[in-house]
């Protein structure tokens, strides 16, 4: 009695796998037949997806017609990519022009989750600091609080940003920010929980810091200075958390793929996002090291830098991927 039931279950799993993915396979076949209309990088992306499906099918249904079909389709796509295609010379540019935005579009839900966690944690930090005098020192540390109070007393609350040389500060801050982004991403391996907690704590610090400045009547002076670099830096951390959620959710929700295959795809997508953030962390490090130190520059200059930074982050990470999707580029 057990054997027929097992075979039927196996068959139903294959049927579900085919039903879910068949529309995509048919789309791939059309693109292969009309390869002149499909960008080479689009074909390369399709090839990766097909080989992922083929790997799963070989594991679950090694002798089935589905596996034979996918193997044939993968061979066709591979042939179209490499038969007459020369190596792309602008691969480096295409990574940020198309690959990163494509992954960002697919990760838009995870990005929303990360933003919600950041905002909620920031509010919790601010409210806690407002009602508990000891909370600021608990989160920010006595040394930092005492140093900032001394700077406020001396009339320069953000003096910490001019306490060392520009180049030394640039390399140190940029490296630290990149490492933070990789940590918040890597923690996604703990089923997204690690990424969520790490993001929550960082946002808690931001909210606490803002309320600390507010309580000292320095928010109007300190906030614009901090957001000169913080607009890019904080946004990038939220996006890095979204990358962690992409990887973590691939473990939690593998779909029709094996958990290992799903994890590999999620990790690859998340890593693309984090690598794509590197230029933005370099930009934030440059602003913090060479510009933020001039805390008493005219307010219009501060607002211009903040506005341009905000536009850059919103356009590239949100609007541009949507635009590419609507144009059929991704």
Image (cartoon, rainbow, N blue to C red):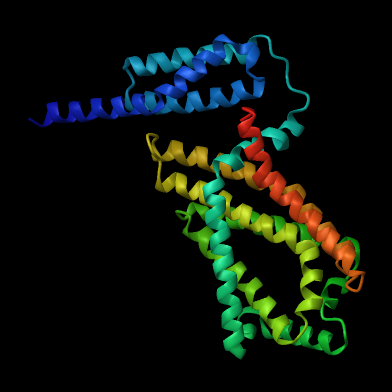
Looking at the image, residue 280 lies above or below residue 126: above
Question: In terms of image quadrants, where is residue 180?
Answer: bottom right
Q: How many marks?
A: 0
Residue 104 shows in this picture: yes
**Percent x, y of residue 83:** 64, 9
Left or right, 89 with reference to 168: left
Looking at the image, residue 228 lies above or below residue 140: above
At x 85%, y 65%, the residue is 302
**Percent x, y of residue 129:** 61, 83
Question: In terms of image quadrants, where is residue 287?
Answer: bottom right
Residue 169 shows in this picture: no
**Percent x, y of residue 91:** 73, 29
> Depth check: 311 or 138 in front?
311
Looking at the image, residue 178 lies above or below residue 129: above
Question: In terms of image quadrants, where is residue 77?
Answer: top right
At x 40%, y 48%, the residue is 252
Looking at the image, residue 260 lies above or below residue 18: below
Q: Residue furthest left?
A: 1
> Depth check: 109 or 144 in front?
109
At x 64%, y 77%, the residue is 208
Question: Looking at the figure, which quarter contains the C terminus?
Answer: top right
Left or right, 290 with reference to 41: right
Question: Looking at the figure, which quarter contains the N terminus?
Answer: top left
**Percent x, y of residue 65:** 33, 14
């Amino acid at each position: 009695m057990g054997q027929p039931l097992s075979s039927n279950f196996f068959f139903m799993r294959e049927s579900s796998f085919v039903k879910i993915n068949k529309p995509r396979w048919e789309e791939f076949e059309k693109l292969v037949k009309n390869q002149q209309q499909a960008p080479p990088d689009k074909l390369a992306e399709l090839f990766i997806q097909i080989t992922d499906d083929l790997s799963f099918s070989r594991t679950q249904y090694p002798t089935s017609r589905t596996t034979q079909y996918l193997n044939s389709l993968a061979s066709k796509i591979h042939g179209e990519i490499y038969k007459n295609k020369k190596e792309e010379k602008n691969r480096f540019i295409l990574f940020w022009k198309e690959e990163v935005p494509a992954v960002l579009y697919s990760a838009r839900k995870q990005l929303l989750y990360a933003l919600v966690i950041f905002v909620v944690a920031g509010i919790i930090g601010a409210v806690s600091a407002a009602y508990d005098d000891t909370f600021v020192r608990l989160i920010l540390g006595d040394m930092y609080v005492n140093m900032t109070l001394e700077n406020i007393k001396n009339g320069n609350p953000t003096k910490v940003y001019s306490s060392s040389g520009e180049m030394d500060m640039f390399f140190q801050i940029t490296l630290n920010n990149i490492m933070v982004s990789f940590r918040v991403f890597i923690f996604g391996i703990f089923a997204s929980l690690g990424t969520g907690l790490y993001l929550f704590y960082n946002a808690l610090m931001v909210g606490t810091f803002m309320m600390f400045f507010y309580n000292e009547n320095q928010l109007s002076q300190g906030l614009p200075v901090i957001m000169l670099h913080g607009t890019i830096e904080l946004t990038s951390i939220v996006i890095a958390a979204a990358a962690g959620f992409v990887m973590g959710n691939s473990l939690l929700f593998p779909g029709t793929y094996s958990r290992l295959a799903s994890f590999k795809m999620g990790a690859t997508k998340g890593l693309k996002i984090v690598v794509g953030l590197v230029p933005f962390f370099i930009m934030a490090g440059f602003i913090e090291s060479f510009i933020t130190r001039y805390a008493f520059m005219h307010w219009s200059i501060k607002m211009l830098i903040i506005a341009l930074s905000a536009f850059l982050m919103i356009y590239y990470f949100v609007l541009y991927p949507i635009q590419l999707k609507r144009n059929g580029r991704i």
